[in-house]
Amino acid sequence: MKKFKYIRPNNLKDACSILKRENDIKILAGGTDLLVQIKDRMKTPENLLDITYLSELRVIRNNSNYLEIGALSTHQDIIDSDLVSNNAGILQQACIQIGSPQIRNRGTIGGNIINASPAADTLPPLFTLESELILISESGERTVKIKDFFQGPGRSIIEPNEILKSIRFKKHSNWLGHFKKLASRKALAISKLSVAGLFLVNNGTIDQARIAFGAVGPTILIGKDTVALILNKKISSISEKEISDAVIKDISPISDLRSTQEYRKAITTILVQRILQNLMKA
Amino acid sequence: MGKINFILNGKSVEFNCPDNWTLLRMLRDGFRLTGTKRGCGKGECGACSVILDNKIVNSCLILGNQIDGTEITTIEGLSSNGELDRIQQAYIDYGAIQCGFCTPGMVLATKVLLMKNKSPNLEEVREALSGNLCRCTGYRKIFEAVLSLKDEK
Ligand SMILES: Cc1cc2nc3c(=O)[nH]c(=O)nc-3n(C[C@H](O)[C@H](O)[C@H](O)COP(=O)(O)OP(=O)(O)OC[C@H]3O[C@@H](n4cnc5c(N)ncnc54)[C@H](O)[C@@H]3O)c2cc1C
Ligand code: FES
Ligand code: FES
C-alpha cells in the first residue's frame, strides 16, 4: 500500500482539532471501503485518522421518542441490538445482508453512509426511517436530514473537517418494514438494486407509507409516486400494472456493469409487489 | 506510530508496525506466521481471516496499528503441544482440504461459529463460512467436516 501517516486521536475533541489542522487527511473507521480504495489507488491520502478507538461513537441508545446509533457501530452491533430490533427492524434486515461475517464485524454504519455509494444497503432503510445525521467539528455540531445529505455517487455535504457522530430517528415500533435486495448471490455481492418499505397498516389499509430505492439512481431515490398510489388503499385492491407505472415514474435506473436499465425497472417493480404481498400476510 | 502491544496466540507481544502495513502483512512479514494467507487482498476471499477479540475478521483490511490492545488468534494458535485442534482434525478426516489455501481461514471461521453455537445446522454453517471462498472442494466436504463437530445431546 502507498505510504501514509497513521494518526490516532485521544478523544473526539482531539480528533476534531487534528482534522482542522491537517490538510490531506481521511477518517478511517472499519476500513472495508477506504483501505480497498487506497490499495486500488483511487484515494491517496497523506494522513489517516483512525477513529476506531473512540468508543463513545459506538453506543446505541434511546430516549422516549428517539433511537440514536453511534457512527462507529458495526453492522454486527446493529444486528445484535435489541433496541434496533424493537424500533427499526428494517435496518437490521439490511445489515444482515451485508457482505460476509468478516465485513459485518468490521464495517460501520457511519462508513456505509459517508462512502455514499448509491448501492449502500443501510441507506434505503435509513431514508424510510427519516433519519437525521449528527455531524461534529471543531466549531460544534449540526444536524442534517438524510434526504438532504447526498449529492451523487460518493458525494455528500459533509465538510472535510467534520466527523459523523451518530444517526438519529424516531422509534418506529408499530411500523412494518421490509428491505429487499437483489444481488448476483447471497454473500459478498453488491446490490444491483434494493427497495425498503416502511408502513403503518390498519385492517389491511395502508395508513402511512415510506419507500426508498437503492442502486437505481445516482443516490437513494424516494418512492413518491408509489407511496401516493398505495396510501389509504386496501393492499389487495392495488394492481400490478398500477405498481409498475408508479415505480417507473419514481426511479431512473442506468445500465452499468452490474445490470441493465430494463432489468432494473422490471425487478424493482417485482420487489415492490413482493413487499406489498408480505404486508398482506402480516 | 510507535510500539503497539497485543496478545498474539495467547502471548503478550510488542511490535513497531510501519504505518501502511496491514495486520496481514504484520503477521506474515513481521511475525513470520505464514499460515494466514493473502488471496484477494480486498475482503472478498477470507483467506486472510483471523480471530480478533473473538470475532472473525479479514486481516487484509485492518492496519497493524489498529490492533493495539486487542487479542489475535491465527491458525498457528489453534494446535497445542503439536496436537491439532479437533476442527483441524475433522477437516483432515473428511477430506475437506485440497490445496489448503482457504483452510486456515475456514478453520478459524469454524472456530468462532462453534464458540457461539455448539450445534449449528447446515444453514448456520453456510452462513458462518459465507465470507470464505474455496476454489477446490465445492464446499460439501467442508460443511460435512463442520457438521461432524456438533455436540450431540
Ligand atoms: C467484500 C466486501 C463486501 C461488501 N458488501 C457490502 C454490502 O453487501 N452492502 C454494503 O452496503 N456495503 C458493502 N461493502 C462496503 C463496506 O463494507 C460498507 O460500506 C461499510 O459499512 C463501510 O464502513 P467502514 O467502517 O468499513 O468504512 P471505512 O472504509 O472506514 O470508511 C468509508 C468512508 O467513510 C469515511 N468515514 C467513515 N466513518 C466516518 C465518520 N464517522 N465520520 C466521517 N467520515 C467517516 C471514511 O473517511 C471513508 O471515506 C462491502 C465491502 C467489501 C470489501
Ligand atoms: S486476502 Fe483478505 S479477504 Fe482475500
Ligand atoms: S482447498 Fe483449495 S481453496 Fe479451498
Image (cartoon, rainbow, N blue to C red):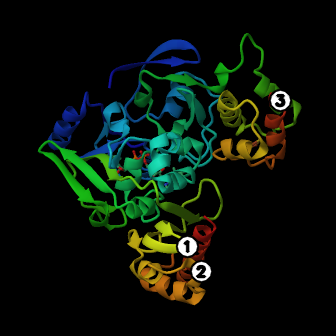
Q: Nearer the viewer, mark 1 or mark 2?
A: 1
Q: Earlier in the sequence, mark 1 or mark 2?
A: 1
Q: Is residue A156 above or below residue A92?
A: below
Disc 2 target residue: A236
The answer to whether the beta carbon of the residue marked 3 is less than 8 Å from any atom of ligand 3 is: no
Q: What residue appears at the point 19 percent right and 34 percent down from the top-left corner?
A: A13
Asked if marks 1 and 3 fall on the same chain, the answer is no
Contact (CB < 8 A) between labels 1 and 3?
no
Q: Amino acid at mark 1?
A: Gly
Res A235 → quadrant: bottom right
Q: Quadrant of the C terminus of chain A?
A: bottom right
The CA span between labels 2 and 3 is 53 Å
* Chain hosting mark 1: A
Tell me the number on the disc at residue A174: none
Disc 1 target residue: A204
Res B35 → quadrant: top right
Q: Give whichever of A281, B124 is nearer the camera.
A: A281
